[in-house]
Image: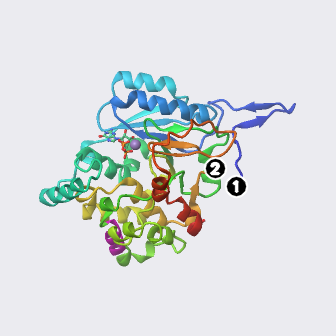
Amino acid sequence: FAKLTYNVVYDETGLKRVLTKDEYPRANATLLTLVRNKELKAIVHTIRQIENTWNHNFHYPYTFIGDEEFTQEFKDTVRRHCSGEVHFEIIPPEIWNKPSDIDPEKEKAGIQKLIENGVQYAGLESYHNMCRFNSGWFYRLEGLKKFKWYWRFEPNTDYYCSIDYDIFKFMEDNDKTYGFTISLYDDPLTVETLWPVTLDFVKKNPQYVHPNGAFRWLTDSVQNPEYTKLANGYSTCHFWSNFEIANMDFYRGEAYSRWFDALEAAGGFYYERWGDAPVHSVGVALFEDKSKIHWFRDIGYHHSPYKSIPNSDKCTAPEDSGYFAPEDVHRQNCLPNWIKYEM
Ligand code: GDP
Ligand code: MN
């Protein structure tokens, strides 16, 4: 792929010059994060790394999304660390809160089962809201409508490699829809009916399935056969969405929107704990050409407990903590399947 830096020009005498914030014609894109006031320190930690490794050259705007008003301290502090424009967007309660058609009895039984099986965050309603919001709502917010591209980041994540090209323009010029760094297996209990609900939708609407979808990655059962079984045919492989770069027009399009309506109707964000990572992943792998999904192997990234660190002199990363045993890491890693079946 051509990785043009985009922001470097040469004057008449051949001297190299980096375009300033005001001069540089950016893509229609924003960095974005859903975050809480109490995560101020943690979000600054990550903003600094995104700035140091990348955005100090490009000055892309940031959008901070909250379900409650941000404090003045939060706003002032993040503004000091962002080299691009800063926007704050508050989610209307009717979007954030649990929809009224969720059946309380069915929800209680579903949550109970997840809790008994030790599923993290199962009993935390705000976590379910967050997953649903990130799956199908953020790109519909008033303040997001004007943007096409987003780079999602989270508090307390790390970026290790300096990237000298404009990632958004790279996506645009190479006709990519979705970019990721890490691909994992999920806990099948959180998505037990995601695949059956999806197959039902697809049977009624076969026209939406892309002939060059990443079907094998979605359904393979070699490495973790019991996962695929428990998730009723879905391998549980997904792109880890705490870092992702994508074109929101894909989500806004007919295929994803109608499928998302079917997911909402099924209620799995509350009866189970469907995550936004498997939802984005199943959507993009079914309804988009897999050649438009890009693995950013040059972005060094960490979100606890996993790191992806390219072996490159452009990257500086701390020694591995050794917290997870290698065999666990191997078991949870679905990247080999992506490479083997879909690249
Ligand atoms: P995990 O990565 O699955 O362990 O979940 P996180 O706690 O990191 O949450 C994912 C993202 O959603 C992070 O950016 C959080 O800051 C954000 N988030 C989670 N719950 C809430 C919430 O109740 N309100 C808001 N505003 N953000 C939330
Ligand atoms: Mn997180």
Q: Which amino acid does label 2 sit on?
A: Phe
Q: In this view, does 290 lie to the left or right of 6?
A: left
Quarter where residue 110 is shown: bottom left
Report the predominant secondary structure element of the magenta stretch: helix
Residues in magenta, as a range: 194-201
Q: What element carries label 1?
A: loop
Q: Is residue 233 above or below residue 135?
A: below
Q: Which residue lies furthest to the right in this view?
A: 13
Q: Residue 227's spot in the image, x, y percent?
A: 38, 66
Q: What element carries label 2?
A: helix
Identify the residue at image location x=73%, y=36%.
Answer: 8
Q: Which mark is residue 170?
A: 2
Q: Contact (CB < 8 A) between labels 2 and 1?
A: yes
Q: Is residue 235 left or right of residue 313?
A: left
Colour treatment of the image: rainbow
Measure the C-alpha gap from mark 2 to mark 1: 8 Å
Q: Is residue 11 left or right of residue 260?
A: right
- Residue behind mark 1: 1
